[in-house]
Image (spheres, rainbow, N blue to C red):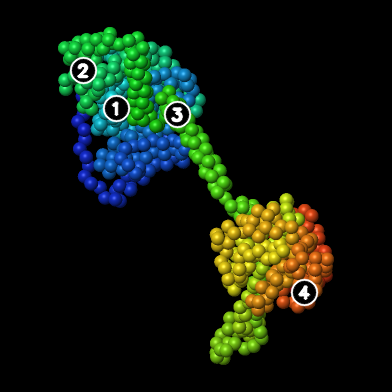
Amino acid sequence: MPKSPEQFEPRIEKETPKPLEKEKKISPEEYQERLERLKNMGKVIGEDFDMAVEAGEKPGWRYRFKPINKIEADPNDVAEKGLDYCFGVISHEGAHRKISEVDFIPKKVWQERGFSFLMNAIEDPRVNNWVSEKYDGAKEWIEQMYNQDLSCEEKVEKTAKEKVGYVPKHIRFGLEVIKYWHTGSFSEDLPEEIKEALEKTIKYSEMAYGSTPDPKNPTEEEITESAQRAYKIVYSAIWPEYQKLVDKAYEDEKLRQKIKDMLENGEIEIKQEGLSEKGEPLPLDELPEDLREEIKKKLKEKLDSMSEEERKKFEEGAEKKAEETLDELEEDENKELKGKLTEQPETKSEEEKRKKEEEEEKKRREELEKIKEEIEKKLEAEKTEYDRAYGEVKPYIDRVAGDIINLFIRERWPKFKKGFPGQRLEQRLKGAMKYAAKKEYRELFERREKMERKEYNFLLLVDLSGSMAGDKIEETFKGAVLFAETLNRVANVLGRVKIAIYGFQNDLIEYKRFNQRMDDERREKMSIMKGEVENKGEHNQANHNNDGYCLETARRKLEELRGKNNFLFVLSDGQPNGDASHHLPGYSKATEEKELRDVVKKISQEGKTTLLGIGLGPGTEHVEDYYSKELRGVENLPNVDVKKLSEQLAKKLEEIIK
């Protein structure tokens, strides 16, 4: 059970032993053995076998309990300071892991300036007391640790001097509490107000760090109760006196900031004894008396010379800087004492820093989002019609290309014919033995026929007459882009694939010849397609669509390649409405529907070209009438959108081929 105040006996005063000498350099094997022992000890003392204990990448001991419990050992200490010292650190940190609890402390109290440092200064001796009683040898190990470098005391003092050039009074108070726990005495050169506060409160500090749970096998309830008891002692009996030092430290720092401002502006000069190692002015009460009086006089003259508004601004600036300096210092000092406490609340400066970072991050995200939107708007404005259509059909390209490639690759795949391989007898016998267990002899007596490299020729013909305006051309243009990109991908995979793209009105409108690459120039040229249906393109004959004439012209271009695998895809609403001059011999405007039917029939009869009529968008059912599936090598897909086209195209092609 924890000691009562009456039972607690303070340590007797004793001299601080000299630091121990560094050990000789150890071997890698010894180093690993030490590290392994530290790992085991940390887990046992903390009673947390999931906790990681490992050598850190940088010098210094770091204690990270979020997102995982982990102690990072100082690799130099492990190698140079010896096991007893390291056992002391591990004992101390393992004890923090086991009995330290502060999550019940009200946030408002914890965020009072200086309170978290005071609580941490009490908690260090408290965990040392507990672990010293629980484990044989722990007391001696912790003594070794404090004897070598007074642990955190020197680090805290060093941090304060590096940060502000001096040690504020409330920080000195906390260090003296730890020093008293270790040595049984205070420093001799303490300012009167610190000494007075310590004398009034040290018995309560002893009570607080003597409030420990049962060292043998404490329950969670006992651990919490002892932590709460220590907090109540600190808050009720120590904090009121300690807070006076915090307030005095704030006034000292505020005054120091005013002096610092005057020094930086060349309004005063301060002798070397009045400056810290960083060259900043020391607090007024730490200066020689003559220098102190001189500075006070200069400061008064400055304030008297200021207007009310100037003075207010000067005072507010000093106050703000003093608050920021002390809050940041407390945060840095806590890193020397904390990092070990489980679920430790944020200090006020930590919370403000976090909120500021969150606000800055939010602002940064909003700015990035705004920049992103502006870039997207600019990119959208710079997009061609082709780019926009490509964005909509992109999800379908892989599927359609894959389907077509799979369909055609079966036509190209090497076939086998029966026969004996050209091998010597002993080789065939070895092969027979190899396949005997599988009872599969067919492969032994097959050989590949010479692979036939097939060629595929595609011509895409797009109706750009006025009847295609509106939803028809929107969907048809997307279809044209889908075909262009899909067939280009098929060509890249299969090879020996040629593609041509034409529009038509009264005559063919060239966008890509067979011998041209599908490049950005071709894509940009195709972007004009939509404008053609409203006479805003280059050909501008939207009142006419001579289907029969243009279909026959396209067929000739395709069959000039003399290939055996020709495909002609027509994107149209299927309604001829030609001019008088572009008709095949024997046909006229009066017979243009018959002209189209006869051309389709001729293509079917000759059997040199596979023909597919596609009606994209509503009102394209006439495609079914003119591109009749009753004819051999002819198929149609009326009233479809690009999504349905992507789902049905390969199946239609397979039906035509068969």
Q: Residues within 10 Å of mark 1 (few under 14, many from 20)?
A: some
- The residue drawn where x is 23% and y is 46% is 25
Given residues 654 and 252, the one toward you in this image is 654
x then y, percent, for residue 195: 27, 13
- The residue drawn where x is 55% and y is 59% is 520
Q: Residues within 10 Å of mark 4 (few under 14, many from 20)?
A: few
Q: Residues within 10 Å of mark 3 (few under 14, many from 20)?
A: few
- Which disc number belongs to residue 163? 1
At mark 4, the secondary structure is: loop
- Which disc number belongs to residue 585? 4
On the rendered image, what quadrant is the C terminus found in?
bottom right
Asked if marks 4 and 1 touch (Cβ < 8 Å), the reply is no
At mark 3, the secondary structure is: helix
Residue 187, quarter of picture: top left
- Which disc number belongs to residue 356? 3
Of badges 3 and 2, nearer the viewer stands 2
Pointer 2 residue: 268
At mark 2, the secondary structure is: loop
How many numbered marks appear?
A: 4
Q: Is residue 426 visible?
A: yes
Q: Which amino acid, by three-letter code, is at mark 1?
A: Lys
Of badges 3 and 4, nearer the viewer stands 4
Q: Which amino acid, by three-letter code, is at mark 2?
A: Ile
